[in-house]
Each structure stands twice: as C-alpha cells, then as structure tokens.
Image (cartoon, rainbow, N blue to C red):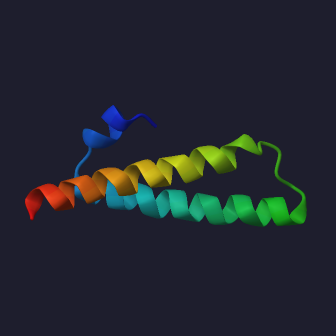
C-alpha cells in the first residue's frame, strides 16, 4: 500500500484497515510458528503497511492539535 493511497482514506477507514492488518499479522505469525507460511515476504509487507498507517494517523493528529 502506497502512502498516497493511505492519505486518500478517512480516519475510520484507516482504523478498519489497521484492524484487518493486525489480524493478518497474527495469522502470519501463527503460520510461521507452525511452519506453514509460504510467502515469508508478506510478514514484512504487512508490518510496513501498519507502520505507514500509524505514521499518517499520527501526522493527522499532530496537525489537528
């Protein structure tokens, strides 16, 4: 997910996306622990997407204050 795509979404949409990515991250960690994870790069992608969303939400909060 690109930063421009994230900035185009509302705070509520980003919160929902953050929840979805958190659940996906949990499932990926569980699969890795069981040795069933096929796409190991996806863990890094999800982690970076979470960080991007949190960064943009933080920027918006600082701009409002």
Give the quarter of the image for residue 35.
bottom right
Q: Is residue 13 left or right of residue 21?
A: left
In the picture as drawn, the residue positioned furthest to the left comes out as 65
Q: From the viewer's perspective, is residue 44 above or below residue 15?
A: above
Q: Is residue 46 left or right of residue 57?
A: right
In the picture as drawn, the residue positioned furthest to the right comes out as 35
Residue at image position (42%, 34%) is: 2
Can you give x and y, in whole percent of width and height, for residue 38 in the image?
A: 83, 45
Q: Is residue 12 left or right of residue 65?
A: right
Q: Nearer the viewer, residue 51 or 17?
A: 51
Residue at image position (68%, 63%) is: 27
Can you give x and y, in whole percent of width and height, for residue 18 in the image?
A: 43, 59
Residue at image position (22%, 50%) is: 10
Q: How many marks on residues?
A: 0
Can you give x and y, in whole percent of width and height, for residue 44 in the image?
A: 64, 47
Can you see residue 13? no
Residue at image position (53%, 63%) is: 22
Can you see residue 55? yes
Give the quarter of the image for residue 3.
top left
Instruction: Point out the image quarter for the C terminus.
Output: bottom left
Can you give x and y, in whole percent of width and height, for residue 11 in the image?
A: 24, 56
């Amino acid at each position: 997910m690109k930063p421009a795509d994230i900035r185009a979404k509302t705070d509520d949409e980003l919160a929902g996306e953050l929840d979805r990515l958190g659940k996906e991250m949990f499932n990926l960690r569980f699969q890795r622990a069981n040795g069933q994870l096929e796409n190991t790069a996806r863990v890094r992608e999800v982690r970076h997407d979470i960080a991007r969303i949190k960064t943009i939400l933080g920027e918006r909060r600082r701009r409002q204050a």
